[in-house]
Image: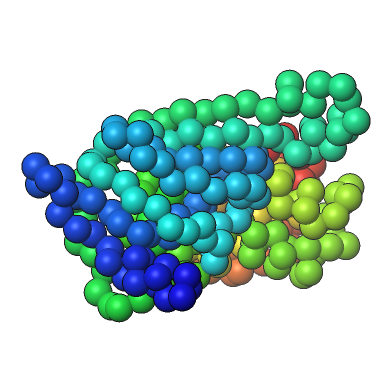
Amino acid sequence: MRKILMAVLMSLGLLAGCEGEPSYKGFGFMVYNYTQFDIDRISLADKSGNSAVTMQVSVGAGDGSVACCFTLKGTEFTAKWRATDSEILRKHIYDDNVDQYFFTREKAVHFPAADIPSGSGPLYLQLHIYPDEHVELALSRKLIGNNRLPIVKTAEWLWDQNKDSLGNFRDGIELMRVIARVTKTSWGKYRIEDAADMRAYMKMYFTVASNFDQDPAIAAVLEKKDRQPGEFARVIDALSPERMAAIRESGSAPGDKNG
């Protein structure tokens, strides 16, 4: 009976609130973490004090993970989260005061009234936290396939395909966290979002030269205003072994963990 009730609530979606404000009733809450930090707890609150809450959103995580069921109202919200750099935390896990390695962020979020996605499935309210820590909200009826920056899949691919060329990384988890750090530049400076482009960018960074983007020809592609998804990856794939060797020779050591 409880499962049936939850499904009914989540199918209600957006109902008009008094005074015409949007009211999101019975939705599932999903958080996408594109930062370099692991989130311990995160909430989204409206002006009336209602909130949606979820826990433990790791670097790059969020797809398919949902907390249920919540109701929020209005167009102005506050996102607040507690997070840590787990690479630092793991070195101090037995300290008496581990709380000193956590920090909190609080961001105002404006989300205008939006059309509810068509379909009869559950409604999900997505909160996307970008590498620069700005926050965006979206509505969806899809449980998976909403990740906008494929940090986890890129790390899995790079570890699987190029493990022997990655240098001094403890494991794929450490690599993923460094990739998230590098994403501050790949997305923040160049708006790399396409999966193939992101794989190409990280392969160059971690196996060729950390400053490969200073090569004039490569920089021209990355900075191209009308660059199409996948275009950067095609350019990298077309580089000859000689060009790769020249970039490696003139560049800085690959895989800089400071991003």
Is residue 29 shown above or below 112? below
Residue 187's x, y, as percent? 50, 46
Which residue in the rendered view is the most extreme toward the front?
1
Can residue 160 be seen in this snapshot? yes
Residue lying at 24% horizontally and 64% vertically, measured from the top left: 116
Residue lying at 48% horizontally and 33% vertically, measured from the top left: 80
| Foreground pick, 167 / 114 | 114
Residue 12 lies in quadrant? bottom left
| Foreground pick, 170 / 162 | 170
Residue 86's x, y, as percent? 75, 39
Which residue in the rendered view is the most extreme toward the bottom?
120
Q: Which part of the image, by quadrant, shows the C terminus?
A: top right
Residue 128's x, y, as percent? 45, 49
**Left-right relation of 227 to 65:** left
How many marks the image carries: the answer is 0
Residue lying at 36% horizontally and 76% vertically, measured from the top left: 121
Can residue 36 be seen in this snapshot? no
**Left-right relation of 164 to 179:** right
Residue lying at 47% horizontally and 59% vertically, measured from the top left: 68
**Left-right relation of 1 to 136:** right
